[in-house]
Image (cartoon, helix red, strand yellow):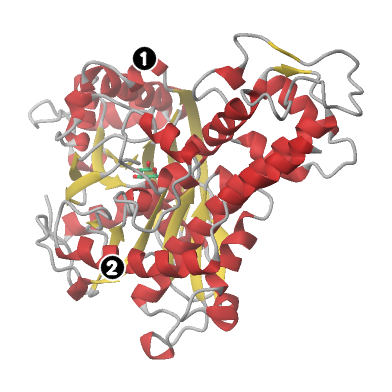
Amino acid sequence: MALLAEAKRISALFEFSDDDVRNAVVEFVTEMNEGLEKNGTTLSQIPTFVTGVPNGTEKGLYLAVDLGGTNFRVCSIQLHGDTTFTLTQSKVAIPKELMVAETAKELFAFLAKQVELFLKSHHEEHFEGRVERHQTPGTPTGYEEESIFRLGFTFSFPVHQTGINSGTLIRWTKGFDIQDAVGKDVCALLQEELDLLKLPVKVSALVNDTVGTLMARSYTAPGKTDTLLGAIFGTGTNGAYVETMSKIKKPLEGAYDSTTGQMVVNTEWGSFDNGLKVLPNTIYDQILDKESVNPGIQMFEKRISGMFLGEILRIVLDIMMGNSKNPFFTDKDSSSNDFGSTTVIDDNAPLKQQWAVDSSILSVAQSDNSVGLRTLRQFIEKDLGVQAPSLEDAQAVKDIAHAIAKRAARLAGVAVAGIILHTGRLDPKGGPEDIVDIGVDGSLVEFYPGFEDYMREAMRAVDGIGHAGEKRIRIGIAKDGSGVGAALIALVAAKLEATGITA
Ligand code: BGC
């Protein structure tokens, strides 16, 4: 029992009370406003030059690529104009060495190559036909404008956006680290490599995955209510929302259509409260941060997203193992070890390696409510590399994993509540809609049982939302935001070009 008491003590360190939530929301709204005033703030509040959300009637064929985590996706999207679409896609894992390459070229040449392979295998007839009919060597790209595929580039890192299809990289996140790319225009980097392969593709739109999620949800959402927020709770975390243009006080560098009076803003909330005024900061959070590639940055993300939750758990368990007072993964304190043998952890076990524990084990721990925790114990063997864990060991893992994930979901609730309050969308004077629509995507919100419930529980504690407000918030999964969303923004970009607002 000593072990479970210890697990309970540690779990309590991850509690984030209703008061903590309320304080954090106030700080979140303050930092949102700061970000709208000037550059260089914790919440970057990046204007995206997207000035409207779709209504489901949009049509056309577009390409989209998505760089933002462990995989690179290339897809083509046919928008049917009746809220539906058809998507063809290919996905490839990004080689680890390219995530930390010396030069940006190494990564972007690899991306362009994947676009070439995709076009050849999925659009060959169409592609070749167009090339033959329209090849016009006199033009700079070698193709007439109309024969060019428009591509939406979902690039899910903080970018200082300078137009709908241009922006310079502010910093890498999620384990990427290619210093050569920082400060460069990522659309130009991709376009250069596509041109070297002579592909008839124009990078027409630069899209954060949260903006894509917002657009995708707006295109597919039931009813007439415009979606307010697109949020990702996956490998990383972030949100983009529809802002009133007059509230964006900092100068906008690029051209845009000002008639709607609105613009989508990418908050980059992963760096909310880097100064740790209101965020929890356990010893485990401190160790994770110190050993990360970007200490002191993305402090909110490091407490919420899938890239980090498995590592927080690993750090806690590793420290617990070193505590001789509470035998853990040693088999000595186990009353029912039905795996038979003594617990063994070899030197290469994921439990011993930084970043080696996948956050999916948190979902497994939460889902397994069987008496013997059999599934969780199998995952402890496979994912942590601990052979023959006892039931009590597994229960301790389950309790701690729950505390870490619940804190993450409550923190996620802080961000969503902050945006709802800031925009006044629940206020009847702020708009006629009865509901506030939110599109979400990402493995945590999709697969962690109860993530949304914990988020909602936190939002109910917030002044200005409460029980009544929380009921009016509709949250829907927006799958394929990075595909269909990017296509929708490429379409917006094409319209801007047609009206002569951009080139
Ligand atoms: C990035 C964001 C992105 C989020 C979700 C964060 O690490 O900074 O740009 O939207 O991950 O993918």
- Taking the image as shown, residue 401 lies to the left or right of residue 394, namely left
Dot 1 alpha-carbon crowd within 10 angstroms: few under 14, some 14 to 19, many 20 or more: few
Q: Residue furthest bottom?
A: 429
Residue toward you, 367 or 108: 367
The answer to whether any part of residue 446 appears in the image is: no
The answer to whether any part of residue 168 appears in the image is: yes
What residue is pinned by disc 1?
A: 97
Residue 318 position in % (x across, y down): 59, 25
**Residue 113 placement: quadrant:** top left
Q: State which quarter of the image contains the N terminus.
A: top right
Q: CA distance from mark 1 to mark 2?
A: 39 Å
What residue is pinned by disc 2?
A: 30
Secondary structure of residue under mark 2: helix
For image coordinates 76% across by 19% down, the residue present is: 330
Secondary structure of residue under mark 1: helix
Q: Nearer the viewer, mark 1 or mark 2?
A: 2
Numbered label attached to residue 13: none
Residue 27 position in % (x across, y down): 34, 65
